[in-house]
Image (tube, grey):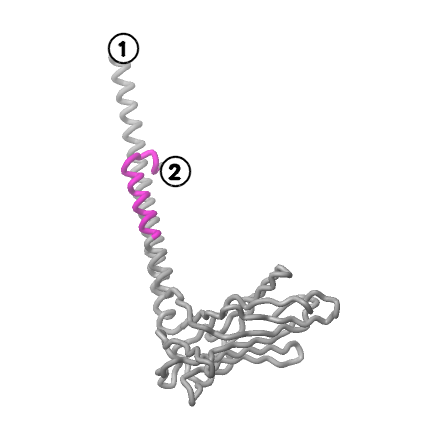
Amino acid sequence: MKEEAGSSAKALGSERSGRRYREGDEESIHLGMNLRGVATALCVFAGAFIAPATAQLVHLSFDIGEARMLFHSIHAESPWNREGGFVTKLDLYYDAEAPLVGMRPGKNWWQAKVDVPAQKRSFLIARPVQEIERLENISGLRFAFRRNDAIAFEEFELTLIFDSPIATEGLLPIPPLPDLDVTELSRSQFGLFGGQTFFPVADVAEGFGGGQIYGILPVPEPSTYAIGALVLMGVVVAIRRRRCRGEASTCIA
């Protein structure tokens, strides 16, 4: 009787163990299918994103040093009359297939980040590029935005002077671009001016500032982010598979 009971217990244990491993294998299969599905979707998304982005959208980020901002307030006693700020980041986005005239707002825009340390405030300003001009006498481009209506007055201008000719062929240039000219008489620079639509603070009447542009900072291509995401997905899949092979119970939810 004891031998029969022992044999029954072993058989039951063996059956349970086999069921656990079969469940683990099924779970591993389902997990692999899910991860493969996610990876496939990510590849499709990355391909759809990379192709138009690298073919059309150009992102330039600028070294602007300590570009200063000044503020005027509607109240004489307001601290905004005494405090200044800094433009800490400036970026330009444009469609490389856009003509030098007839810019298309929405595809071409600029963005600036303004920090006011004394007031512990930061402002992110983003507006379209409305005008572009190729400077004939020097190798340069001028980008501009201007709004003047009953609601607000806003103005932005960015001038880039290169140290060698740029080949545009009637279109905007595609990186890599020449270095910026930093000589005394031909500086790249920017300026911005606006009121509460730029700086939504009750006491602020206007803010204005700008400065010299010292260079163009490297910006990772969109493909860099997509490749990084794919590498991360591969690492996750590899770790999960290793765990599933080592111990079936790890794969059981």
Image vertical order of residue 108 relative to residue 40, above or below? below
Q: Residues within 10 Å of mark 1 (few under 14, many from 20)?
A: few
The image position of residue 135, as x and y in percent, is: 44, 86
Tell me which segment is drawn in magenta.
Answer: 232-251
Q: Amino acid at mark 1?
A: Lys
What is the quadrant of the C terminus in the image?
Answer: top left
The image position of residue 96, as x and y in percent, is: 39, 77
Task: Classify residue 206 by image quadrant.
Answer: bottom right
Q: Which mark is residue 2?
A: 1
**Label 2 SS:** loop
Residue 231 left/right relative to 59: left
Q: Which mark is residue 253?
A: 2
**Label 1 SS:** helix
Residue at horizontal 30 percent and vertical 46 percent from the top:
238
Q: Residues within 10 Å of mark 2 (few under 14, many from 20)?
A: few
The question of residue 238 being in magenta is answered with yes
Image vertical order of residue 41 relative to residue 172, above or below? above
Q: Residue furthest bottom?
A: 137
